[in-house]
């Protein structure tokens, strides 16, 4: 997932650093929406790439606004 986000942000030259220092972290996780599909008839509204692009754009705008705020005393 990290590689996909970096690709979409055109930051493929970055390499994530995994420290494995979190306490009580689940070492191996496998996510699947199969049960929700079968039991609830759920389906995603967005393909993964489209959802990631929208999320990245939201964060870019949010962080840009946060960095442009000026506090007057």
Image (cartoon, helix red, strand yellow):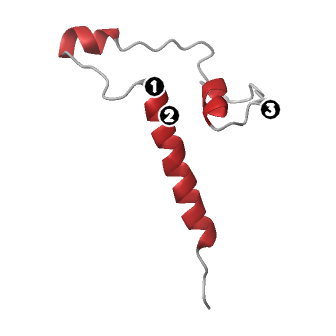
Q: Is residue 18 left or right of residue 29?
A: right
Q: Out of 40 and 19, give the one closest to the viewer.
A: 40
The 10 Å Cα crowd at callout 1, few under 14, some 14 to 19, many 20 or more, is: few
Q: Are marks 1 and 3 in contact (CB under 8 Å)?
A: no
Q: Which residue is mark 2?
A: 52
For residue 24, say whether it is visible. no
Judged from the image, the secondary structure of the residue bearing numbered disc 1 is helix
Image mark for residue 13? 3
What percent of the width, then of the height, locates residue 1?
A: 59, 24
The 10 Å Cα crowd at callout 2, few under 14, some 14 to 19, many 20 or more, is: some
Q: Which residue is mark 1?
A: 48
In the rendered view of the protein, which quadrant contains the C terminus?
bottom right
Q: Earlier along the polypeptide chain: callout 3 or callout 2?
A: 3
For residue 33, what is the image quadrant? top left
Judged from the image, the secondary structure of the residue bearing numbered disc 3 is loop
Query: Distance from label 1 to label 3 (Cα)?
Result: 22 Å
Q: Is residue 44 left or right of residue 5?
A: left
What percent of the width, then of the height, locates residue 54?
A: 46, 41
Query: Distance from label 1 to label 2 (Cα)?
Result: 6 Å
Q: Out of 23 and 30, give the one closest to the viewer.
A: 30
For residue 22, what is the image quadrant? top right
Q: Out of 49 and 31, give the one closest to the viewer.
A: 49
Judged from the image, the secondary structure of the residue bearing numbered disc 2 is helix
Q: Are marks 1 and 2 in contact (CB under 8 Å)?
A: yes
Image mark for residue 2? none
Q: Is residue 36 above or below residue 18?
A: above
């Amino acid at each position: 997932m990290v590689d996909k986000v970096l690709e979409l942000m055109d930051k493929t030259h970055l390499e994530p650093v995994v420290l494995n220092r979190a306490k009580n972290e689940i070492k191996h996780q496998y996510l699947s929406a199969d049960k929700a599909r079968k039991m609830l008839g759920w389906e995603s509204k967005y393909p993964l790439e489209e959802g990631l692009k929208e999320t990245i754009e939201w964060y870019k705008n949010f962080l840009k606004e946060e960095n442009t705020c000026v506090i007057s005393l």
